[in-house]
Image (cartoon, helix red, strand yellow):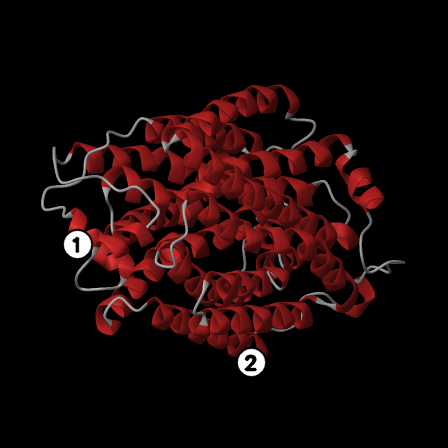
């Protein structure tokens, strides 16, 4: 075998090796994706307003922000498999507690527990990094995004089927999510081998990274900017999954079924992009081109979403929507006071609002899908092997910090200024990011395909 042929063979992604982690992440994400489209409605059924819903949505990523670097560093030191299993057990406990929740404080506690153990994705990314080369890493990490796409396609469908069978009982949906979490634990235990040999594990003096260590990483010229970019783009896109159901509920009167359809649509686009297109783009154009494409489309989609016409679809009934949120067949004046989110009245119905949001969501789904795996791929190509888990953990931590802030800030803006401003501001902010990325990311800072 000639050197070129051997090199090409090594650069070809081994799907048999990465398939188990893909399946595990997919099953794990099914539990998460069942909950996310319904979480604002779940909170609204307990009388939460937009600000409270934003705070509730921010609890999970805030806890993940604290724990993800710790779990990433632990995986560098003790191996990927035990850390992944431990984090999955925490997720299972969080979903189970959510199923038993009877009030907003218990719902808040359930999300906090899940967030503390929420290092699943960063550890899975580290497993894929262990199993790939620089030339096929973007494609491999894109599988995580494809798992997200499939999860957010299948999860809302399963949630809606569960609601149909259970009579719109949100507690049952949480128990179904817990069941998927338990399945992911079993799959990890029986299917996933350890990917980081003992001789390759880093020897850290501290288990918990300090603020100084984090600032040191951020101070590294190329990696630091990519980590900041990870935070910034996730600040924009992360708000979508938490605020979009609230936005469509208020602007278009979308119920759980309508939001399920919208999230399925997002998932289908993500699967198409991350299941195939990102491989072509990566091989042809490299990470820099994909990052700029993602920022461009994300900005356009967020601005389009901000100006979505306030028009519910034909057949919409405000009374029926309030009944669903109150989980009652009839709605009294007291029930209407319980639902703190403003919803449209029954006049001026048409298809323009729904058509608009489905068009606007296409560029958002493209941009949001490609940015995270591509930025992480670029980071790993600039990192030493023994620090990859730590850097991916820091990257997840940056994403979690953004996810924690954006629903709280977005919920506050939503509560005080209406539904347009959160999406308009983030869209304009992304245009600024695009300009900065075009200047800061060069061929010398991010490797390009040869």
- Residue at (82, 59) in percent of width and height: 202
Q: Residue at x 22, y 64 (%)?
A: 328
In the displayed orientation, state which residue is furthest to the front: 334
Label 2 secondary element: helix
> Where's residue 98, x and y in %?
46, 68
- Using the rendered view, name the quadrant where residue 190 is placed: bottom right
- Residue indicated by mark 2: 190
In which quadrant is the C terminus drawn? top right
The label number, if any, that marks residue 320 in the structure image: 1
Instruction: Find residue 226 and report its image quarter.
Output: top right
Q: CA distance from mark 1 to mark 2?
A: 46 Å
Q: Position of residue 258 (x, y in %)?
A: 24, 50
Residue 127 left/right relative to 104: right
Q: Nearer the viewer, residue 346 or 290?
A: 346
Can residue 124 be seen here? The reply is yes
Q: Residue at x 9, y 46 (%)?
A: 315
Mark 1, secondary structure of its residue: helix
Query: Is residue 449 in sight in this rendering?
Result: no
Disc 2 packing (10 Å; few <14; some 14–19; many ≥20): few
Q: Looking at the image, is 78 positioned above or below residue 306?
A: below
Residue at 27% x, 36% y is: 357
Towards the viewer: 116 or 12: 116
Work out whether 149 lies above or below 421: below
């Amino acid at each position: 075998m000639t050197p070129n042929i051997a090199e090409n063979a090594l650069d070809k992604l081994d799907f048999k090796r990465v398939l188990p982690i893909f399946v595990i992440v997919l099953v794990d994400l099914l539990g998460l994706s069942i909950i996310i489209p319904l979480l604002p409605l779940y909170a609204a059924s307990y009388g939460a307003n937009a600000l409270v819903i934003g705070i509730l949505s921010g609890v999970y990523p805030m806890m993940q922000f604290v724990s993800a670097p710790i779990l990433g560093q632990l995986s560098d030191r003790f191996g990927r498999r035990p850390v992944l299993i431990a984090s999955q057990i925490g997720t299972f406990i969080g979903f189970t507690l959510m199923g038993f929740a009877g009030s907003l404080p218990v719902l808040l506690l359930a999300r906090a527990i899940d967030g503390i153990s929420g290092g699943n994705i960063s550890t899975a990314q580290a497993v894929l990094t262990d199993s790939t080369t620089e030339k096929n890493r973007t494609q491999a990490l894109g599988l995580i995004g494809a798992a997200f796409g499939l999860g957010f396609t299948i999860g809302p469908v399963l949630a809606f089927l569960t609601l149909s069978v259970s009579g719109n009982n949100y507690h049952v949906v949480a128990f179904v999510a817990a069941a998927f979490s338990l399945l992911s634990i079993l799959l990890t235990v029986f299917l996933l081998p350890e990917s980081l040999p003992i001789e390759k594990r880093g020897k850290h003096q501290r288990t918990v990274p300090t603020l100084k260590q984090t600032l040191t990483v951020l101070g590294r010229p190329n990696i630091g900017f990519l980590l900041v970019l990870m935070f910034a783009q996730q600040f924009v896109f992360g708000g979508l999954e938490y605020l979009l159901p609230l936005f469509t509920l208020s602007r278009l009167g979308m119920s759980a079924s309508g939001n399920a359809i919208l999230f399925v649509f997002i998932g289908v686009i993500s699967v198409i992009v991350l299941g195939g297109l990102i491989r072509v783009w990566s091989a042809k154009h490299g990470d820099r081109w994909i990052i700029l494409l993602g920022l461009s489309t994300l900005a356009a989609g967020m601005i389009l979403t901000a100006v979505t016409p306030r028009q519910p679809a034909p057949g919409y009934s405000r009374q029926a929507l309030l009944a669903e949120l109150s989980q009652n067949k009839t709605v009294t004046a007291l029930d209407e006071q319980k639902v703190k989110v403003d919803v449209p009245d029954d006049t001026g119905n048409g298809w323009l609002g729904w058509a608009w949001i489905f068009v606007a969501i296409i560029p958002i789904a493209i941009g949001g899908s490609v940015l995270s795996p591509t930025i992480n791929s670029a980071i790993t190509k600039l990192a030493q092997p023994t620090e990859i888990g730590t850097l991916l953990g820091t990257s997840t931590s940056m994403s979690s910090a953004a996810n924690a802030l954006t629903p709280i800030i977005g919920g506050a803006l939503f509560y005080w200024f209406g539904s347009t401003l959160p999406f308009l501001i983030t869209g304009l902010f992304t245009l600024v990011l695009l300009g900065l990325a075009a200047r800061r990311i060069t061929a010398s800072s991010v490797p390009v395909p040869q």
